Image (spheres, rainbow, N blue to C red):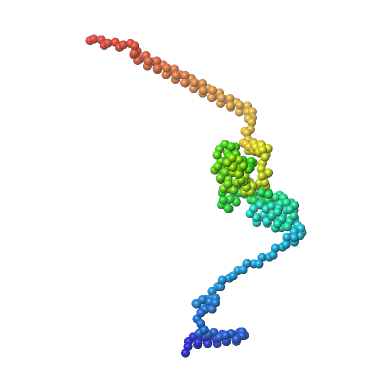
Amino acid sequence: MNTDKTRSTVANDAIAGSELKSGIPTDVPPIDASEGDQPEVGETETGELEDAPANIEDAVAEPDVPFDKLIHKSRRLSDERVRGILESLLFASDKPLSANDVHSCTGLDRPRIQAAMEALAGVHREGVHGTVLYEVDGGWQLRTDPANAEYVRRLLKVKPQRLTRAAVETLAIIAYRQPVTRPEVEDIRGVDSGAVVKALLDRKLIKILGRKEEVGRPILYGTTREFLEFFALKDLASLPTLREFQELSQEHREMVEEEAPTPPPPLTALDAPARAAVDALGTDSDAALVELEQAIASADERSKAAAGILDSAQPSPEEPESPPSPR
């Protein structure tokens, strides 16, 4: 008697009986173990079910709204809604957004974009909001408030970017006189600037604009977009003028005067008892000084007298000693 067939028959009968009780149709083909020992798909040799790899398909992207319809839709947006959209775009962007960039993705009119940006700048300003809206490199960018820089650096674990005095001098010359050559920079500074120029190139604060049409064809240098972003400048015209430098120095002088320590209060006149006490102290000190001077004078006289006695006791070198008398 075949054991495998007996087991399969018992299993079939059990399944048929359970289906009759539960009302499930019994037209399921019988299980025959002799048809093959290979496990079914999703089942291992030990009988355990194996998870089949799940195929995650990318969601079908919604078709973009035609630009003319986007423009028509943007005209019905309220000013508050427009400011919310612009704030989201500024938050998501890693570079300054110009009016053209915002117009291409929203369909908003450029004057309305400018007005909304200025309204947001009034909200996101230094000392009021945690983020500040700057007009940088012909666009707009959200940045953290400089007053919170210490905490942001701790979070990001970064060091503040600092420029040496030589780098600031070289960068200022290039910014104000670009395009400029390295010999012209060195002529103004009076020292070699090769290493500083290379460091500024590595930090992408300056770039090579070309070569000057003269003997040797020296390289011309100018500032970059990263320079404007680094100093939060709208454009090169936003650089301070000489008059602003003078006003800034005057402002610094006023700040120094404000932060200077307050002078001591003027001396007030002493009342009669206090003046008498001060006069008594002065009289006592004068008397003590007189006694000290007398003691010093008497000590000098005694030292002179002792020196005179010692001089008289010693024989004179000019007088020969008398010979001893005969006995």
Tell me: residue 320, above or below residue 16. Answer: above
Work out whether residue 116 can be spotted.
no
Q: Nearer the viewer, residue 146 or 172?
A: 172
Residue positioned 67% across, 54% down in the render? 90
Horizontal side, residue 247 vs residue 304: left or right: right
Residue positioned 64% across, 30% down in the render? 268
Residue 15 falls in which quadrant of the image? Answer: bottom right
Q: Residue furthest bottom?
A: 1
Q: Nearer the viewer, residue 312 or 188?
A: 188
Across and down, in percent, residue 108 comes to 73, 56
Across and down, in percent, residue 140 comes to 68, 51
Tell me: residue 185, above or below residue 36. Answer: above
Q: Nearer the viewer, residue 246 or 17?
A: 246
Across and down, in percent, residue 128 comes to 67, 49
Horizontal side, residue 86 vs residue 217: left or right: right
Residue 255 falls in which quadrant of the image? Answer: top right
